Image: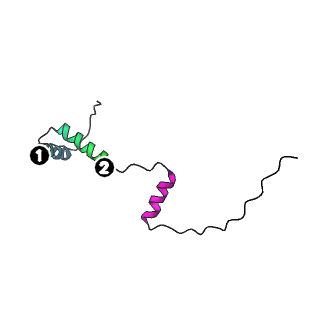
Amino acid sequence: MASMTIRNLDDGLKARLRIRAAEHGRSMEEEARDILRVALMSSEPRPVHILETIRRRVEAVGGIDIELPPRSPIREPIDFSE
């Protein structure tokens, strides 16, 4: 397991962590581990594909309608036999 040192922690924040740890009957270190564990487990994973990222952002504002141009027939393939 890895270890980590947190420097420049605000005195008020440290006091609140100490109180919260005491309320839960554990050390400040264990309380900090639990806070990190819960915060990181509940976060939504980032979308892997750019399309999914764009879709989520657009859906959040109600979506958009895009007029698609009419499709034309597919061209005949080039004949390389000659």
Where in the figure is residue 23, as x and y percent of width and height?
Answer: 11, 46
Where in the figure is residue 79, as x and y percent of width and height?
Answer: 82, 50
Q: Mark 2 and mark 1 in contact (Cβ < 8 Å)?
A: no
Q: Is residue 55 magenta?
A: yes
The residue that appears at 22% across and 44% down in the rendered structure is 10
Camera-side residue of 20 and 65: 65
Where in the figure is residue 76, as x and y percent of width and height?
Answer: 78, 57
Q: Residues within 10 Å of mark 1 (few under 14, many from 20)?
A: few
Q: Which mark is residue 23?
A: 1
Q: Quick check: 80 left or right of 61?
A: right
Question: How far apart are labels 1 and 2 at the CA level?
Answer: 23 Å
The residue that appears at 51% across and 55% down in the rendered structure is 51
Q: Quick check: 64 left or right of 37?
A: right
Where in the figure is residue 41, as x and y percent of width and height?
Answer: 30, 46
Q: Quick check: 8 left or right of 74?
A: left
Frontmost of labels 1 and 2 is 2
Q: Residue furthest top?
A: 1
Camera-side residue of 46 and 8: 46
- Secondary structure beneath label 2: loop
Quadrant in the picture for the N terminus: top left
Pointer 2 residue: 42
Q: Amino acid at mark 1?
A: Glu
Residue 2 lies, with reference to residue 35, above or below; the image says: above
Residue 62 lies, with reference to residue 14, above or below; the image says: below
The residue that appears at 27% across and 42% down in the rendered structure is 37
Q: Amino acid at mark 2?
A: Ser
Q: Start and end of the magenta stretch?
A: 46-64
The residue that appears at 28% across and 47% down in the rendered structure is 39
